[in-house]
Amino acid sequence: MKLAPRLALLLAVAVVSATACAPQTSDNSSSGKDEKSGTLRVWLFQEVNTKPKEKAVDAVLADFEKAHADTDVTVEYIPVETRAQRIKAAFNDPKSAPDVIEFGNTDTAGYVKDGGLADVTEEFVDWDEAKDTDPTARQSVTVDGKVYGAPYFVGVRALYYRTDVFEKLNLDVPRTLAEVASTAKQVRAAEPDLYGLAVGGAYTYGAMPFIWANGGELATGKGGSYASAIDSAAARKGIEAYTSLFGDDNCPAAKCAGMGGNDTVTAFASGKAAMAIGGDFSHQAVEAGKVKGKYAVVPLPGVEPGSTAPAFAGGNNIGVLKSTSHRTLAVDLMKRLASKKAQAGLFDAMGFLPTFTDVRQQVAKEEPFVKPFVDTLAAGTKFVPASPAWATIDSSQVLPTMFQEVVSGKKDVGAAAGDAAMKMDAAFGSAG
């Protein structure tokens, strides 16, 4: 899409304000150096199709190198699947490490614990554009009150539904989570070849809104003092609501218990489900499927009519490694890569939602498909515990195991949630 003149003007003003002053020089680089020329190395993530992203990034680098005549930038696009090994190895080998990296927003706390990311709190606070960063995105770069990067883009999920199926069966769009469940079962009864709502036992981020909407939390506390809350009464109510969707009357456990997020979106896109919880980042896949032109998206409703279930605010960040010998330049490049202009360009190229509320509102006016996701963000989102333990909890499949134990009938909700809480608390305790 082309940016409208009003958005182009907004971004032009933002870029001027962001670059009018020379970047601040900091003296806390662990390398003991802050060179003002040379080569900066950047690691960004590969995408399914990285070419559009490369074009957007190259535009930022051209401006950066123009502003810093004696500086060059080399970019390597690394696989997301091996990011943990590559980045942690870089933390341990400063000579071969990049200066600036892209990282998942759930990785922040772990990388801070590893001592790899530079504290950029002062520069972030002094950055004019930062005031328009949405609160959850800012939380994703914050550990114990200190900022360790700049939000790059945000991803959020909403409810996709088949307009042709709803019209055929004379169904109303659900206004509550209870209505999502009852509508799903109505579809399944009328159309046995369809899942009413595609759900997955391994779809952690699709299940979380049910827990949060019912007043539950994953954990409580902050820093090193987190404690699991997954076995609280409110959280158990949300687990019950989600796991009740697995069965022959909606999405059979034998087929759906092992499904993840991509599987549920694929089921919807291929015409096998009447509803699915998918992200703004799922739009291209759905458009390429059999349901093109026959679906719509609304925020996933909450418990009460008119409410929105809190969604997990996913996305990526840009950070500076503590080991950089070009701290001032690296921080300037971080801000340029994560700037309003750059995020708008990334949205144009990849459809990734900006983390700045004003830019996000403008792109929503330009692209109608964005609106339900922007509305979901505006209603309030949630994030995972800002603890290095989350990486262990996530990779150990603690929550998927809990859901799968319930839907398989091996354990009731109370027992499964209690066991999950013990595993989470063990991980929090080990994280220190």
Image: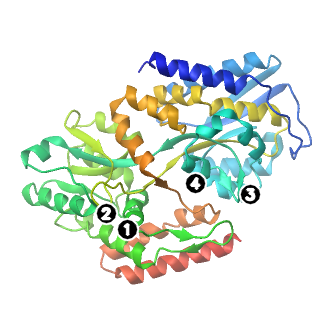
State the residue position of label 2: 303
First in residue order: circle 2 vs circle 3: 3
Q: Position of residue 386 (x, y in %)?
A: 62, 60
State the residue position of label 4: 106
Secondary element type, mark 3: loop
Please name which of the two marks, 1 or 3, marks the residue nearer to the observer: 1
Q: Position of residue 290 (x, y in %)?
A: 21, 37
Q: Position of residue 30 (x, y in %)?
A: 87, 47
- Label 2 to label 3: alpha-carbon separation: 40 Å
Q: Residue furthest right?
A: 32
Residue 351: in sight, yes or no?
no
- 184 with respect to 431 (left or right): left
First in residue order: circle 1 vs circle 3: 3
Look at label 2 and name its amino acid: Val
**Which colour style is shown?**
rainbow
Look at label 3 and name its amino acid: Asp
Residue 319: in sight, yes or no?
yes
Image quadrant occupied by the N terminus:
top left
Q: Point out which mark residue 82 bears.
A: none
Q: Point out which mark residue 114 bears.
A: 3
- Label 4 to label 2: alpha-carbon separation: 27 Å
Secondary element type, mark 2: loop
First in residue order: circle 4 vs circle 2: 4
- Label 4 to label 3: alpha-carbon separation: 14 Å
Secondary element type, mark 1: loop
First in residue order: circle 1 vs circle 2: 1
- 198 with respect to 69 (left or right): left
| Crowdedness near tag 4: few (<14), some (14–19) or many (≥20) residues, C-alpha within 10 Å | many
